[in-house]
Image (tube, rainbow, N blue to C red):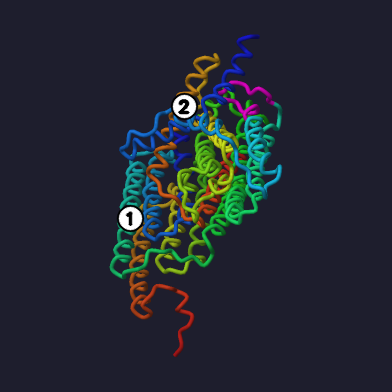
């Protein structure tokens, strides 16, 4: 079981790097969706901190919620937004693909090197859990600052959320179900808001280049 | 004693004798994918025989460097074959640290070919040499990171030690890391052998050729030597990938050799499938692919170092 969990964590990090390297928005959205679906397996694969009837229901609910929201709902909305706003399919990076891959790899290496030194509030469920979470958050931040398109920045935000979700699995023993449901709903609402912002940028400037926002004059 | 010698020599002879067949098998798979019958499996041998029977033509601007290029290239690849362990059998000349010599010999082979191309004084061949060397500069770190990850995983500093019996247990213990390293190694193999996502071995369109440009001025036996060295190199990388991917635990030489050759057939099929289903990458995307391979290998190393 631990072996397969390790494989899931490695797959999540590889998908992070794939998002950094992908030059097409649709491909990047599908990659993030696949990562979300893979992450939904985690609560089922990891050993529950305190086994019990209530705990099992909690874990299954968390997995199904994550699968529906991260794997289908949000990516579906983003693909719909791309179609409706007629967004061009290139990612248009500020930092090139090769430098962002190298930066991502450095972040992953740092996360895997230093995560052992971090004090944790809960017993570690899997040795790869914390570094995977940190690398995913790092990749998400990198994506937010290094891409020009608003859609790509939303993707970076989703990656950050995926990283936080991995960390949240570690703490699921402490977190009630309502808090997690609230986080997932917040995510959905945030994507809605960003969708509206995307439409507005698109209507005002006839493009989704966030660089245009800095040249506003009154 | 005799069987032990045979166990080491036979795979090497298979390496020398069956490399063109591997190339023929890849071509056959590609033609089957395209719905054609395709050339016979032994066609590369006939091509080599035909080329060897021709008289070479040398341009008056070339020097001895041009004539030495193919021979040095072939010698370096054969010497690299002496260090390689085929299908888990011990190599003919194993020693600690031989993986560094292995990578250097492959580099020497490429250097000789590029130098011979530059010696013709043709700007076109200079362009081909520049492209080949540029991509090699991205492929070599990936190859080294893969080999270092293997060193770390097996604790052995020689290729024979890395690819010995312990591989199945290693897959159970360090599966994800080995999978990453094997993936990176496949990408490196495609780039080093000028196969499709990086270079098209059958193209003759000036704008996109890489490896084929460098050998345009070679003719007759020289060209045969270059083609043979290229097939040997493909076999070397195939042996590395196959042994890493199918870590079968045979200790007796005969079944081990059989399984290894079966694995090579599988490798040829996979290569043909990749070449038939993928398009060539744009030239400026190739370094990106190779950097991605390096990053995967680095990640494998990081996983193993924990």
Residue B208 falls within the magenta-colored stretch = no
Residue B87 falls within the magenta-colored stretch = yes
Whole-percent x, y for residue B141 in the image: 62, 46
Q: Which residue is mark 1?
A: A69
* Horizontal arrangement in the rendering, residue B132 relative to residue A140 (left or right): right
Whole-percent x, y for residue A45 in the image: 41, 39
* Horizontal arrangement in the rendering, residue B264 relative to residue A60 (left or right): right
Magenta stretch: helix, strand or loop mostly: loop
Whole-percent x, y for residue A193 in the image: 35, 70
Q: Chain of mark 1?
A: A
Residue at 57%, 23% in the rendered image: B88
Residue at 32%, 51% in the rendered image: A65
The span shown in magenta is B81-94
Q: Chain of mark 2?
A: B
Mark number for residue B263?
2
* Horizontal arrangement in the rendering, residue B32 relative to residue B83 (left or right): left
Q: Quadrant of residue A151?
A: bottom left
Placement of A49 over or under B97, stated as above or below: below
Marks 1 and 2, Cα distance to the nearest angstrom? 43 Å
């Amino acid at each position: 079981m631990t072996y397969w969990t390790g494989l899931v964590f490695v797959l999540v990090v590889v998908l992070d790097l794939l998002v950094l390297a992908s030059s097409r928005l649709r491909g990047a959205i599908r990659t993030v969706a696949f990562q979300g679906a893979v992450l939904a397996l985690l609560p089922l694969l990891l050993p529950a901190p305190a086994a019990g009837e209530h705990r099992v229901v909690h874990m299954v609910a968390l997995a199904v919620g994550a699968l529906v929201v991260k794997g289908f709902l949000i990516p579906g909305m983003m693909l719909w937004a791309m179609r409706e706003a007629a967004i061009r399919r290139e990612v248009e990076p500020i930092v090139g693909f090769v430098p962002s891959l190298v930066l991502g790899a450095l972040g992953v290496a740092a996360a895997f090197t230093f995560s052992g030194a971090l004090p944790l509030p809960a017993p570690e469920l899997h040795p790869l859990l914390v570094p995977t979470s940190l690398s995913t958050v790092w990749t998400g931040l990198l994506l937010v600052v290094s891409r020009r398109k608003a859609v790509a920045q939303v993707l970076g935000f989703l990656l950050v959320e995926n990283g936080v979700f991995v960390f949240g699995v570690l703490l699921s023993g402490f977190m009630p179900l309502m808090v997690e449901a609230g986080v997932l709903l917040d995510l959905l609402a945030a994507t809605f808001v960003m969708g509206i912002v995307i439409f507005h940028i698109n209507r005002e400037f006839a493009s989704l280049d966030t660089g245009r926002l800095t040249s506003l004059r009154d | 004693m005799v069987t032990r010698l045979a166990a080491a020599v036979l795979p090497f002879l298979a390496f020398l004798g069956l490399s063109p067949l591997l190339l023929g098998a890849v071509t056959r798979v590609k033609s089957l994918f395209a719905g054609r019958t395709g050339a016979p499996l032994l066609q590369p041998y006939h091509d080599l025989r035909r080329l060897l029977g021709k008289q070479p033509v040398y341009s008056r601007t070339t020097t001895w460097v041009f004539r030495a290029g193919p021979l040095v290239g072939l010698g370096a690849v054969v010497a690299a074959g002496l260090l390689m362990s085929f299908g888990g059998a011990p190599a003919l000349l194993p020693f600690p640290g031989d993986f560094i010599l292995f990578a250097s010999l492959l580099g020497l082979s490429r250097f000789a070919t590029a130098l011979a191309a530059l010696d013709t004084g043709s700007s076109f061949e200079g362009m081909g040499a520049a492209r080949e060397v540029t991509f090699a500069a991205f492929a070599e770190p990936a190859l080294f990171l893969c080999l270092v990850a293997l060193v770390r995983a097996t604790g052995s500093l020689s290729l024979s030690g890395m690819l010995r019996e312990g591989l199945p247990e290693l897959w159970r213990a360090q599966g994800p890391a080995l999978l990453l390293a094997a993936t990176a190694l496949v990408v490196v193999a495609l780039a080093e052998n000028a196969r499709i996502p990086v270079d098209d071995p059958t193209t003759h369109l000036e704008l996109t050729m890489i490896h084929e440009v460098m050998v345009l001025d070679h003719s007759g036996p020289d060209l045969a030597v270059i083609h043979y060295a290229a097939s040997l190199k493909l076999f070397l990388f195939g042996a590395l990938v196959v042994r890493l991917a199918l870590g079968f635990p045979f200790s007796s030489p005969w079944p081990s050799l059989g399984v290894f050759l079966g694995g090579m057939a599988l490798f040829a099929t996979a290569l043909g499938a990749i070449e038939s289903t993928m398009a060539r990458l744009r030239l400026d995307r190739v370094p990106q692919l190779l950097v991605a391979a390096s990053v995967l290998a680095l990640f494998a190393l990081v996983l193993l170092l924990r």
